Image (cartoon, rainbow, N blue to C red):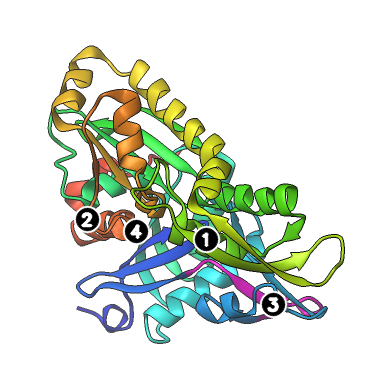
């Protein structure tokens, strides 16, 4: 082992639209923070990132911009994303930013240009070797599915920016669907609902809290009433409004239907032998969106297939990416192949 090995880490990263999770070889998950950056508008210097930047969201003054450099599962602001990746790696590695290898989980819908942007960002952040893995493949590995087996499994990974649906067998993705309807769009739907129904403006963070606390895909045994604070659009003054979980469910309907339609489209494209496997083994839900109350039940009703929510669905992708970095030889077949331009 050389000196460089002592001061470097093999890193697995789930670079998500909503959260970034980092796994370090032999240490496990060491970081789970929001993919948010606060920077000085004049100098573009990063002031805060992750949890600290989230605290500033919606409260910043004119010289500070709080942004999410990832949109819809891909890098939207290259410079800021690169700075964010570097800061997260530094924090996760306790200041040792050198990384021999990085494996990054990406959406199945990314273009070649977007893949290159992720690779370049990781390299500029200090990585000597960068591998990409598709999020549903990482999620499957993370929940202990044998992806090498000649047996089909279906993963529905609902993140912040995208919902990734894939049928996996023999270390590869047989067919997939990636739609830009996920947690963020659900938050936007809640914001729009308050604007239209109550002439009230609420922030993104408030919408996220409402979704987590009372959002659902099926009627609840006992509907919940919550008190929401925001700003009156007409009077311009703060106001509070009581809303029920039934109203929030109605606001989320369109997004839920689009996710179910994408699941059905993927099932329609699945070869018959693999369809039989899915009928036996069911559909696995991963990602933060899997925690929406009753979503598994709703997909089950619509597809007549068994549906299961993975244990700790939020970390499934980074756990799988971590397993890939722990055993790079075994999982080299599942990495996204580099295309020559």
Ranked by sequence position, the earlier of labels 3 and 2 is 3
Residue marked by disc 3: 39
Q: Which mark is residue 210?
A: 1
**Span of residues in magenta:** 34-46
Quadrant of the snapshot with the N terminus? bottom left
Which of pointers 4 and 3 lies earlier in the amino acid sequence? 3
Q: Which mark is residue 314?
A: 4
Q: Where is residue 168 in the image (x, y as percent from the top left)?
A: 26, 32
- Mark pair 1, 4: CA separation: 18 Å
Q: What element carries label 2?
A: loop
Q: Name the residue under label 2.
A: 311
- In the picture, residue 236 is in which quadrant? bottom right
Most foreground residue, 265 or 174: 265
Q: Which residue is drawn at 73% across and 70% down?
A: 239
Quick check: 282 left or right of 209? left
Q: Which residue is drawn at 31% across and 28% down?
A: 301
């Amino acid at each position: 082992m050389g000196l460089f090995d002592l001061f470097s880490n093999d890193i697995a990263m789930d670079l998500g639209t909503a959260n970034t999770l980092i796994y370090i070889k032999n240490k496990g998950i060491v970081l789970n923070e929001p993919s948010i950056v606060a920077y000085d508008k004049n100098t573009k210097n990063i002031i805060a990132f992750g949890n600290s930047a989230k605290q500033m969201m919606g409260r910043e003054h004119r010289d500070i911009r709080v942004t999410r450099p990832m949109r819809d599962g891909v890098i939207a602001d290259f410079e800021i994303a690169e700075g964010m990746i570097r800061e997260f790696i530094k924090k996760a590695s306790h200041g040792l930013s050198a990384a021999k290898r990085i494996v990054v989980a990406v959406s199945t819908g990314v273009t070649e240009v977007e893949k290159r942007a992720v690779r370049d960002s990781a390299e500029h952040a200090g990585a000597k070797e960068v591998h990409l893995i598709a999020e549903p493949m990482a999620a499957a590995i993370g929940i202990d599915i044998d992806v090498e087996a000649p047996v089909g499994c279906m993963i529905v990974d609902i993140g912040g920016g995208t919902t990734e649906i894939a049928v996996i067998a023999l270390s590869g993705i047989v067919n997939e669907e990636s739609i830009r309807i996920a947690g963020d769009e659900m938050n936007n739907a809640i914001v729009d609902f308050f604007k239209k129904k109550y002439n009230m403006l609420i922030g993104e963070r408030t919408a996220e809290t409402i979704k987590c606390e009372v959002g659902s895909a099926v009627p609840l045994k006992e509907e919940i009433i919550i008190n929401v604070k925001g700003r009156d659009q007409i009077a311009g003054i703060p106001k509070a409004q009581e809303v029920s979980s039934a109203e929030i469910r109605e606001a989320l309907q369109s997004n839920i239907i689009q996710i179910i339609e994408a699941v059905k489209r993927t099932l329609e494209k699945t070869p018959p032998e693999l369809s039989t496997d899915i009928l036996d083994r069911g559909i696995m839900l991963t990602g933060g969106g899997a925690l929406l109350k009753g979503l598994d039940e709703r997909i089950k009703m619509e597809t007549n297939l068994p549906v299961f929510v993975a244990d700790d669905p939020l970390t499934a992708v980074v756990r799988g990416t971590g397993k890939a970095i722990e055993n790079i030889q075994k999982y080299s077949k599942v990495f996204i192949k580099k295309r020559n331009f």
